[in-house]
Amino acid sequence: MRQTWRWFGPKDQVSVDDMLQAGVEGVVTALHHVSAGAVWTPEDIAARQRDLAAMKDGSPSGLEWEVVESLPVSEAIKKQRGDWRAHIANYKSSLRNLAAAGLETICYNFMPVLDWTRTDLAYRLPNGATCMRFDIVDFAVFDIHILERGGATEDFPAEISAEAARRFAAMGDAQTSALRRNIVAGLPGAAESFTLEDVRGHLAEYDGISAERLRGNFIDFLEQTAPLAEELGLRMCCHPDDPPFDLLGLPRVMSTEADYSAMMRAVDSPANGITLCSGSLGARPDNDLPGMMDRLGDRVHFLHLRNVRRETRGICGSFYEAEHLGGDTDMVALVGAALAEEARRRRTGRRDISIPFRPDHGQDILDDLGRSAQPGYPAIGRLKGLAELRGIIAALTGAGAA
Ligand code: DNO
């Protein structure tokens, strides 16, 4: 298993030196400044490769850009509106440019409007560490009372809507604006700048787009891009919905094992693969992560290893981002299933034996608490997660015995 680390480019508060000292072998990054739909040029790609090749003092880091996360799919492509055909042509140009630069693994997602969604970006744990959390009642407060989306009340179980009404009545302005900011932070590129009107505008664009229609648009996108990716020797891998259930009345089509199986059957190419994110998928009790790795493993091109602790029962519920070995997913079993897949690949002579993984998210601990890195991406919390995962791999492969 290949130890990688997400880096947000030169602006990242966690440096190339930091990740090198964390022991990573390869880098996961993207051209975050290029807007979705535009072409990633060879010049921009080469510049990012140079950025991560040097340490602070200019000496070579020895690291390479190994995984693209994400080459974003534009809203126009997801809705098949406006410039979507030009955006698909641009996506294909970006794939060609990435392949020419030596990249092979391309992560993306097909979530409408929202990328990841949390209600609290710094939830305090009993030991003083903080982590990200999704609270279903807070989310209902936002949806029903702050965004005032039509039909929102009916989208939640009656007891959640009732609790949300009570909670909202007790909240002050500071709390409601913090909640709004936390939720809007998951809007790609939006951060502070999205107003509620912007969000309403985006949601309205999905009126009349059912899950079936979105799935159809997704398959159209894959039919256009996966054959080219295969020809170029690329592996595309779709990240799941996070959280893996419907939000804000939007359709979601990548939340379960059945969703992944359907997408792979529809466009049956090794280049049409999966980013198995145990944290996203694990927020739902009916997703069996070690089983998914076992059954879908030959198409898992990238692993996000992270754990969540579910706080409520049911499919749509509250959870927080636990320590990597501390949540509801059996991480030892999941890593074991990934190693078994690698053994299968070795037997069948595949070239891509080593599956890249990254310690996805981390709790803010020690010096992370003052560093204000990207939410979910602290240096030390992730280093701890990586160290624990490395320990599991060493124990399961006997590497520690050397
Ligand atoms: C959140 C990430 C996601 C992920 C994209 C992939 O921390 O896991 O933003 O990068 O959904 O396209």
Image (spheres, rainbow, N blue to C red):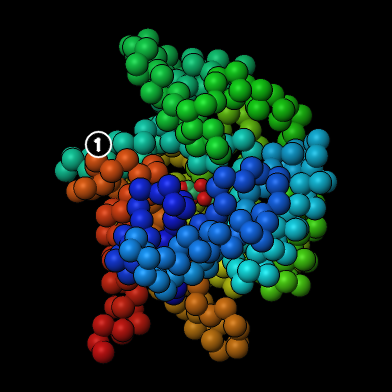
Q: Quadrant of residue 278?
A: bottom left
Query: Which residue sits at x=21%, y=48%?
Result: 367
**Crowd around label 1: few <14 · some 14–19 · many ≥20 (10 Å):** some
Quarter of the image containing the C terminus?
Answer: bottom left
Q: Position of residue 186 (x, y in %)?
A: 50, 37
Query: Which residue sits at x=61%, y=56%?
Result: 44
Q: Is residue 245 above or below residue 20?
A: above
Q: Is residue 388 visible?
A: yes
Report whether 70 appears left or right of 37.
left
Residue furthest out toward the front: 58
Query: Which residue sits at x=72%, y=28%?
Result: 205
Q: In which quarter of the image is residue 1?
A: bottom left
Q: Give the amino acid type for the residue marked by disc 1 in the picture.
A: Arg
Q: Quadrant of residue 58?
A: bottom left
Q: Is residue 66 above or below residue 321?
A: below
Q: Is mark 1 on a helix, strand or loop?
A: strand
Q: Is residue 89 above or below residue 333?
A: above
Residue of label 1: 124
Report whether 202 appears left or right of 367.
right
Q: Which of 122 and 145 is in front in this view?
A: 122
Numbered circles on residues, count: 1
Q: In this view, does 395 lie above or below 70?
A: below
